[in-house]
Image (spheres, rainbow, N blue to C red):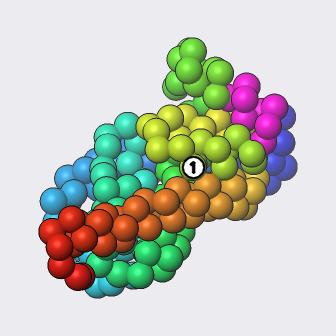
Amino acid sequence: MSDRPWLSGWRLTLTRVFSLVAVIAITIYIFSIRDQAEKLAGYGYPGIFLLSILANATLILPVPGVALTFTLGAVFHPFWVALAAGTGAALGELTGYLAGFSGRGVIESNPTYKRIKDWTAHHGGWAILILAFIPNPLFDLGGAAAGALGMPVQVFLFWAWIGKILKMLLFAYAGAASVDWLFNLMGGAP
C-alpha cells in the first residue's frame, strides 16, 4: 500500500511512469539546447534563475551551472546572483526527486545510491543540505533517494534550496573577488 493514499494501484504506477518519461524528456531537451541557453544570462537575474533551473534539471549529463554562477558573480551583485541561481538550482533538482519517486528500481542496485539512500533515510533534510552544498554529481542520487524514500517534496525543496544558496554564495562571491584580484594583479582598479 502506498504512503500516499491519493496514489494507489494504477494511479501510482501511471504517475511513476509519467514522472520518469518527463525526467528523461527534460534531460534530453536541456542537453540539446545547452549552447543557446547561455544567452539567457543577458536577461539578468531572471535569466540566471532560468539557466540554473536548466543546469540542474539534467540527470547524469553535466551542465556547468556553478561556472555560470562564478562568472556572473563578477558581473552582477553576487548575493542576488546566488539567490537567483540557488533558487533555480533547487527547483531544477526536482527531476532527480521525481526520478527517485518514479523509478525506485532503476538505480537501487548501485552501491553509491544505496549508501546515499541510507544516509538520507538516517539524516533526512540535513543529508540533502550537505549534498546540495558540496559541488558534486551525486546530488541527483540524493534527490532520487529523497523521492524514493517518500520525503515530502516541500521538505526536499527547503533543504536543497538552503544548500544550493550556500554553495552559490561561495561561487558568486569567489567570482566577484577574482575580478578584484585580477585588476589588483594588473595594477589597475576595476
Q: Is residue 111 above or below residue 65?
A: above
Q: Give 2 or 23, whichever is nearer the viewer.
A: 23
Magenta-colored segment: predominant secondary structure: helix
Q: Is residue 55 above or below residue 111?
A: below
Most distant residue in the front direction: 187
Residue 47 shown left or right of residue 171 in the figure: left
Q: Is residue 170 visible?
A: yes
Q: In the visual, does 42 lie left or right of 112?
A: left
The foreground one among 184 and 69 is 184
Quarter of the figure with the N terminus: top right
- Residue 183 percent location from the top left of the image: 21, 72
The residue under the point 80% across, 48% down is: 4
Residue 65 lies in quadrant: bottom left
Residue shown at 48% from the left, 70% from the top: 82
- The three-letter code of the residue at mark 1 reads Phe
Q: Residue 62 location in percent, x, y?
A: 32, 43
Counting from the top left corner in percent of width and height, residue 170 is at 49, 60
Relative height, residue 173 to residue 156 (above, below): below
**Label 1, on which residue?**
133
Residue stretch in magenta: 117-124
Residue 16 visible within the image = no
The residue located at (38%, 48%) in the rendering is 58
